[in-house]
């Protein structure tokens, strides 16, 4: 495998990503959409998720494709970002046709960033507006680190952020990942600069430091956040033609990447969740081998994207946690 030309989830042709953030709010929204509706699925392994319209992604539900996926800060308030995205898509004539009416299908997930020092005493929920702005900004290139849904994210040790990565399989199939990292656990070994995801790094995409010389003894780590304050939410995507059931298996496999790069992950206090998206532009010539490799690539890309999110986060006045770059960059 090799990274795609952008090393972003938008190396999957047809996908677009947009970010919107508010400096005073210290929060934001990230939207993934596509030129055409796409197959989507979802798998949750954390104990405290927050979601919208995710039941319809199950393989036995009627809706076969969605118009966008939303990652948002703001805890439950951030679910309103999906409303803003849906309004923007409706204005563009997108959506599930029901007679003369079109209803955009916009599942989403949220992370908790309400205690990060931002101004949260709003009179009107700002997340619908942020969602519509993120949709309007969607394109092939987009910023990482302190951006979008990762704008106000934190982790167990370092400032969190938004990350992405991609891989091209020998078959030509492309896989990518997009993630907002707000984890209870840590992405580095102890207080050092070494990322847990180092064995899967492509080039020096998050510093090229290699694995830690030794892992610190953390046999019984203590939670550094309270219940509901943590969550890593992600999307993995491919241009392969997948059914909803196959896409769900890709989401399940991708959780391995979260476990490789965040220690600990999938705790009762996190809402760890992975969406899967498949544009269907490329047929699988060898369904067994291709499906096997897609799952592995999804996990690898997600691990790399998680490290890149923290590596690229930038320090800002009022931060409650240090940025990795301010200590080691």
Image (cartoon, rainbow, N blue to C red):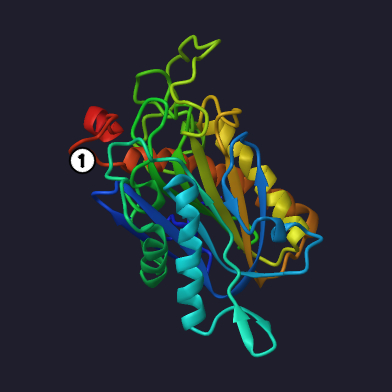
Residue 242 found in image quarter = bottom right
At horizontal 59% and vertical 28% (from top left) the residue drawn is 267
Residue 253 in picture, x, y percent from top left: 67, 43
65, above or below 127, in the image = below
Residue 319 in picture, x, y percent from top left: 25, 34
Q: Is residue 60 left or right of residue 82?
A: right
Q: Residue furthest bottom?
A: 100
Q: Is residue 62 left or right of residue 239?
A: right
Q: Is residue 106 left or right of residue 241?
A: left
Circle 1 residue: 316
Q: Nearer the viewer, residue 209 or 271?
A: 271
At horizontal 67% and vertical 47% (from top left) the residue drawn is 43
At horizontal 65% and vertical 37% (from top left) the residue drawn is 45
11, above or below 251, in the image = below
Label 1 sits on a secondary structure element that is loop
At horizontal 51% and vertical 30% (from top left) the residue drawn is 262
Q: Nearer the viewer, residue 254 or 224?
A: 224
276, above or below 215, in the image = below
């Amino acid at each position: 495998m090799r990274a795609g030309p952008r090393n972003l989830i938008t190396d999957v042709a047809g996908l677009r990503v947009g970010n919107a953030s508010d400096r005073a709010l210290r929060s934001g929204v990230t939207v993934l959409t596509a030129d055409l509706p796409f197959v989507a699925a979802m798998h949750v392994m954390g104990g405290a998720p927050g979601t919208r319209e995710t039941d319809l992604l199950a393989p036995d539900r009627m809706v076969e494709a969605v118009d966008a996926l939303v990652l948002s800060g703001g805890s439950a308030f951030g679910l309103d970002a999906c409303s803003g995205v849906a309004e923007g898509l409706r204005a563009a004539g997108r959506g599930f046709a029901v007679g003369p009416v079109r209803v955009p299908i916009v599942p989403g997930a949220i992370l908790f960033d309400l205690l990060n020092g931002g101004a949260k005493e709003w009179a009107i929920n700002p997340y619908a507006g942020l969602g519509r702005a993120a949709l309007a900004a969607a394109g092939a290139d987009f910023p990482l680190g302190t951006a979008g849904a990762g704008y106000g994210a934190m982790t167990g040790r370092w400032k969190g952020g938004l990350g992405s990565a991609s891989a091209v399989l020998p078959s030509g199939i492309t896989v990518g990942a997009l993630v907002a990292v707000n984890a209870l656990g840590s992405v580095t070994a102890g207080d050092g600069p070494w990322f847990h995801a180092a064995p899967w790094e492509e080039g020096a995409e998050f510093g090229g430091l290699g694995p830690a010389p030794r892992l610190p003894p953390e046999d019984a780590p203590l939670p550094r956040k309270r219940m509901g304050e943590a969550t890593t939410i992600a999307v993995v995507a491919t241009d392969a033609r997948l059914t909803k059931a196959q896409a769900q298996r890709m989401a399940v496999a991708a959780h391995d990447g979260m476990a490789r790069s965040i220690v600990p992950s999938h705790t009762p206090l996190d809402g760890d969740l992975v969406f899967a998206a498949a544009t269907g532009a490329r047929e699988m010539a060898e369904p067994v081998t291709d499906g096997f490799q897609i799952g592995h690539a999804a996990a690898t890309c997600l691990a790399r994207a998680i490290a890149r999110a923290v590596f690229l986060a930038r320090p800002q006045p009022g931060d409650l946690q240090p940025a990795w770059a301010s200590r080691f960059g």
